[in-house]
Image (spheres, rainbow, N blue to C red):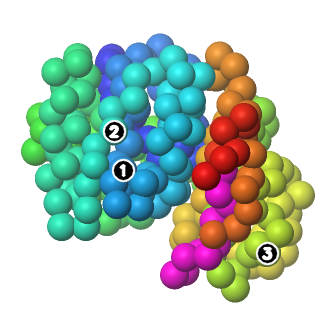
Amino acid sequence: MKFVASFSGGKDSVLALHEMAAAGHESVALLVMYQPEAGRSWVHGIGPQLLAAISDALEIPLLCCEADTENYNERMEWGLCQARQMGAEACVFGDIDTALHRQWDEARCAAAGLKAVLPLWGRDRLELVRRTLDLDYRCLIKCVRIGVLPESWLGEELCQAHVEQMLAMGVDACGENGEYHTVVVDGPLFHHPVLTINRGPVRLEYVVAADLTLAGNESP
């Protein structure tokens, strides 16, 4: 089956992509929702050059959809329609167990004439994050929720020690409640690693984010 991946760049969307590839399915594009005014992707806050480098390393075309809060659903559906024209029969999401998220995924796909596929759905959150690490995906901690996780973790590679610390703190180690987000820069699906530099923290309303950029592209 050919599919488009709803792609945040984080560990769950990459694991969903991995599971589909392992089952013999083919991704025609990485669909990324992008905030043009902010100059970065929604939620994970990845800049355009880093997104392009990740797409290149995965050897999967990038389908970037500019959207704001008012037209987000409409633009997502537009992107899904573009993917259908590229041969996609379905859209793959990395959602795990939040019913409202699944309902949203299925509504957007229905509007675009695609099937919604959620390969991680219903699986144990802790098992999923450990599987991602066991597969040797290199997941950099992109942002942490203020007052929940240490800002010193920003830019670090997520590891089992972080997982154990989060469990000890009573924090969901999968980050499904927005405790943290990642950007994946290497692993089994990558044809080469994406090298990055952390230019320091950026404080936003609820999170602090690492300003990750491509190595060799450190100037503002």
Quick one: 147 or 103, which is closer to the camera? 147
Report the Cα–Cα distance between label 2 and label 1. 6 Å
Q: Is residue 218 above or below residue 58?
A: below
Question: Mark 2 touching mark 1, by CB under 8 A?
Answer: yes
Q: As drawn, is 105 to the left or to the right of 43?
A: left
Q: Which of marks 2 and 3 is in front?
A: 2
Q: Label 1 is placed on what type of residue?
A: Tyr
Mark number for residue 34?
A: 1
- The answer to whether residue 172 shows anywhere in this view is no
Residue 31 locus on image (x, y percent) = 35, 37
Which residue is the site of mark 3? 150
Q: What percent of the width, then of the height, locates residue 5? A: 39, 34
Q: Which residue lies furthest to the bottom in this view?
A: 147
- Give the Cα separation between the discs numbered 2 and 3: 31 Å
Q: The residue tagged with tag 1: helix, strand or loop? A: strand
Q: In which quarter of the image is residue 141?
A: bottom right
**Identity of the amino acid at label 3?**
Pro
Q: Is residue 107 above or below residue 201?
A: above
| Foreground of the two, 38 or 122 | 38
In the image, which disc is placed on residue 64?
2
Left-right relation of 136 to 108: right
| Prevailing secondary structure class for the magenta stretch in the rendered image | strand
Q: Residues within 10 Å of mark 2 (few under 14, many from 20)?
A: many
Residues packed near mark 3 inside 10 Å, few (<14), some (14 to 19) or many (20 plus): few
Q: What residue appears at the point 26 percent right and 55 percent down from the top-left corner?
A: 67
Q: What residue appears at the point 72 percent right and 34 percent down from the top-left corner?
A: 216
Start-end of magenta stretch: 203-212
Image position, residue 159 (x, y; %): 83, 50
Q: 178 or 154, which is in the foreground?
A: 154
